[in-house]
Image (cartoon, rainbow, N blue to C red):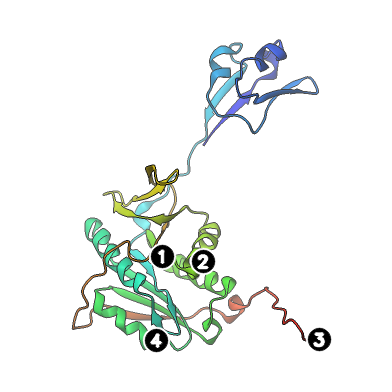
Amino acid sequence: MAKLVINQTKVGNIQEVISICPFGAMEETNGELLINAACKMCKLCVKKGPAGAIEYVEESKEAIDKENWKGIAVYVDHIDGVIHPVTYELIGKARELAEKIHHPVYAIMMGSDVTKECRELLHYKVDKVYVYDQKQLARFIMEPYTAVFEDFVNHVKPTAILMGATPVGRQLAPRLAARLKTGLTADCTILDINENTDLVQIRPAFGGNIMAQILTPNHRPQMATVRYKVMDAPEREVEESGEIVECKIDTDKLSSKVIYHLHGRS
């Protein structure tokens, strides 16, 4: 991130400086020059304004230790244990990405009485399936599911998380990204990964007229959602491989502050 810093003592004629900006992003308030939200960071005021009056300052970025983040994780989207096929497509893509950087592939499944169903994932070469099987997770509710996912990320630290752009995924992914203070790219059509583990997220933009390439180099985990039938699902293996890791989270974190009103009842 960058910002413009104004040295008021060097501004001189405020109205002359204001006239430099073609976007109307500068204004005078109480005898001082201020920059408003219309600023495009074009730096024209820096170049043409009085020397030293306005400075363009690059803010330092906090470096993240990418070595502490390992693995490509896939969210297992399901209803009553019936796994949505987009999950298998994302596992296939996760395996492809993980092979490039020599990372493991994880799956995270949450629900009630789903431990048996999650064994099916072991037929798709997932290294570890983390399952949170608790009765409070029987149905998708935003706060508990976000808390579980946050617990998984804090303990496992995957470098990237792939989620299906399903009704649940479209709600859960942005909430989780906000909770983790990381980036999220929705509706990716192409995913790749660099040697430094930066996830290359490509998606249509401007009505599909261009393909935007998005990176999240300074945050982990990296998050992306993908629509069903965009990626190819791998073949199911006859034998199981990998392991199931049973996880628990404090039930106090599984409460919801959402109040449901039933119409027609007092």
- Of badges 1 and 4, nearer the viewer stands 1
Disc 2 vs disc 1: Cβ atoms closer than 8 Å? yes
Q: Earlier in the sequence, mark 2 or mark 4?
A: 4
Q: Which mark is residue 115?
A: 4
Earlier in the chain: of badge 2 and badge 1, it is: 1
Secondary element type, mark 4: loop
- What's the residue type where badge 3 is placed? Ser
Using the image as rendered, state which of residue 218 and residue 27 is in the foreground.
27
- State the residue in front, 14 or 102: 14
Q: Quadrant of the C terminus?
A: bottom right
Specify the quadrant of the image occupied by residue 115: bottom left
Q: Are marks 3 and 1 in contact (CB under 8 Å)?
A: no
Residue 35 placed where, x, y %? 66, 27
> What amino acid is found at the position of numbered circle 4 in the picture?
Thr
Judge left or right: residue 165 versus residue 51. Answer: left
Task: Classify residue 4 as left or right of residue 236.
Answer: right
Q: Amino acid at mark 2?
A: Leu
Q: Which residue is mark 3?
A: 266
Look at discs 3 and 4 and give the one toward the viewer: 3
Residue 262 image label: none
Q: Which residue is mark 1?
A: 163
Q: CA distance from mark 2 to mark 1?
A: 9 Å
